[in-house]
Image (cartoon, rainbow, N blue to C red):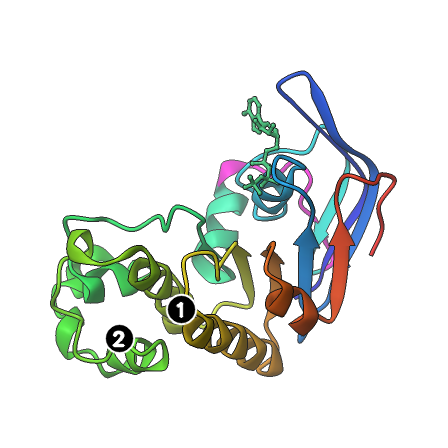
Amino acid sequence: MDITATNITLRRGGKILCEGLDLHASAGELTAVIGASGSGKTTLLNCLALLERVNEGQLRIGGRDMTTVPESARRRFWRDSAAFIFQDYGLIDAETVAYNVMMSTPPLFRRRALTNPAVNEALSSVRLEGRGGEKVATLSGGEKQRVGLARAMYKNAAIIFADEPTASLDHENRDLVIELLRQAAARGATIVLATHDDAAITAADHRLHLGTHPATV
Ligand SMILES: Nc1ncnc2c1ncn2[C@@H]1O[C@H](COP(=O)(O)OP(=O)(O)OP(=O)(O)O)[C@@H](O)[C@H]1O
């Protein structure tokens, strides 16, 4: 499911973050949004994920104009197609790791999360096997980050947005996260990540630099 943003302007807090920005993120590829702190990486990712609106320009996802969509279409996009690995993890601290991995499944089913083979497979993939019963509040930042990735892997989403997905990780786990995102791309997912991390930037198929507009990829 390709994402095409055309002639995008983003203004926030009295600042112009970008003007005339074009981006094309293709299925099967990893696109990295890079730039200094405060350049607008998170804002752009949020807009591509329909969590915020662009000020000007057009956004097409899967060939469909999604620039201004009704709430129902936005919800459908999230239910069926998208996963987001948030910079601040976006997990429910009071719930278990397994419950959090299953967030894309209706609440009733999450109670059986611990015995769900797909949940355990997702946790193994991020080296958190056997940790499904622990409360998220007790995990380290790097472990929470990997739970966020496990949630995206479990959902098998067509589009994965990842905001600084390697920020809290040691080198070994950083390489693991990059490898898993690459594997998701190889399965046909569209991956868009905001990152400062040289290894993630190198692993990307395309790079979009913010802060030097007009910017294109
Ligand atoms: N809703 C908002 N209201 C006011 N200012 C905002 C809003 N959203 C973003 N900004 C500002 O826009 C700028 C870009 O923020 P953003 O979080 O997108 O940057 P970033 O490149 O992701 O930064 P970092 O690398 O530090 O996470 C910041 O100066 C931020 O304060």
Q: Residue at x 55, y 68 (%)?
A: 158
| Front of the two marks 1 and 2 | 2
Q: Position of residue 138 (x, y in %)?
A: 15, 55
Q: Which mark is residue 155?
A: 1
Percent position (x, y) of residue 31? 69, 63
Q: Residues within 10 Å of mark 2 (few under 14, many from 20)?
A: some
Q: Give the quarter of the figure containing the C terminus.
A: bottom right
Q: Residue at x 50, y 37 (%)?
A: 71
Q: Is residue 155 something that shows in the picture?
A: yes
- The three-letter code of the residue at mark 1 reads Lys
Which is nearer the eye, 137 or 122? Answer: 137
**Residue located at (73% from left, 51% from top):** 60
The residue that mark 2 highlights is 128
Question: Do the numbered discs 1 and 2 sit on residues whose CB atoms are within 8 Å?
Answer: no
Q: Is residue 6 above or below residue 168?
A: above
Q: Which residues are magenta?
A: 63-71
Q: What kind of element bears circle 2?
A: loop
For residue 181, above or below residue 183: above
